[in-house]
Image (cartoon, rainbow, N blue to C red):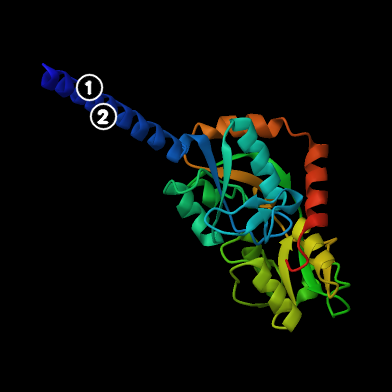
Amino acid sequence: MKKKILLLLAMSLSIIMLVTGCGSDSNSETQKEPAASETFKVGLECGYAPFNWTQMDDSNGGVKIDGSKEYAGGYDVEIAKKIAEGLGKELVIVKTEWDGLVPALTSGKIDAIIAGMSPTAERKKTIDFSDIYYKSDLVMVVKKGGNYESAKSIQDFKGAKVTAQLNTFHYTVIDQIEGVNKQPAMDNFPAMRVALESGIIDGYVSERPEGVSASAANQNFAMVEFTEGFTTSDDDTAIAVGIAKGSQLTEQINKILAGIPEEERTNIMDTAIKNQPAAE
C-alpha cells in the first residue's frame, strides 16, 4: 500500500511539473519578441540633413537605428514618430542607402520610406505615395565667396562643375543649364559636401532645407536661390511617404498627416535645421 501511495505521488508531481513547464515555455515565447504588426519599420538614409541624419545619442528626440549604436534625427524622423504614434505602433528606424530604399520596401524589409523622397511618376510605377508632407524649391549649394555665390539664374552656371545625388530628379535638371560641366552623380549629400569643400565640384543641386542646413553647418558654404530657376513639376519638389502598392497604410497615413497643421510642420523643419549635427 505504501509503495502504491508513493507511486501515485510521484506520478502527480511529474504531471504538475510537465504542465508548469509547458506553461513557462509558452509565456517565454510570447515575451521574447513583439509581433511584426506591432512595429512600424521606416527606411531612410540618415544622411540628408535636415530631413534626416545620424547622431551618437538620443538628444533632441533622436531614435535608435535598428541594429546599431547610433541614432537618427531630423524632420523625417519627427514625421515618422507622429505617424507611428497615430498607428499605435513602435517606430523602428532602418538605415538604408538611397538606392536600396525602394527594394527594401517592395521586399517587405520596411513598411514605409520617409526619407525626403519625391513622388515622381517613375517611382509611382513601383510604389505608392502618401499625400505630401513637405514641399520645397531647388537651390544650388556653392562655396562662399566663390565665383557662383552671386548667381541669379541657373544659366550663370555655364562651364561650372555641377552634380547632384544619384538617381534623383536633382541630377536630371542639371541638363537645363547650357554649357554646364556636368559631373558624375554622387551617392549621398555628405559626399557632395566633401567634394564641394575640396574644389572637386563648383556646386550641387539640392532642396532649400538642405541648402539652409549645409550653409548653417559649414561657414564656407552658401546657398543660391534663383530668380530664374529650374523647370520642375509639382511632384518633383514635393516630399511624400513611400508605401507598398495597394497597402492599407496609405489611407491611415494620409489621415495622420492631415492632422499635422502647416504651422507645426514649419516649426518641425526650423527645429531640425537648428538641431542638425555640425558634421552633416
Q: Amino acid at mark 2?
A: Leu
What distance separates the C-alpha of mark 1 from that of mark 2?
A: 10 Å
Q: Quadrant of residue 11?
A: top left
The quarter in which the N terminus is drawn is top left
Q: Is residue 276 above or below residue 21?
A: below
Front position in the image: 142 or 98: 98
Q: Is 151 located above or below residue 261 in the figure?
A: below
* 209 relative to 243, above or below: below
The residue that label 2 is drawn on is 18
User: Which residue occupies the foreground of this view, 155 or 20?
Assistant: 20
The residue located at (67%, 48%) in the rendering is 77
Say which amino acid is labelled 1: Ser
Residue that label 1 marks: 12
Counting labels gives: 2
Residue 179 screen position, x and y as percent: 70, 78
For discs 1 and 2, the disc positioned in front in the rendered view: 1
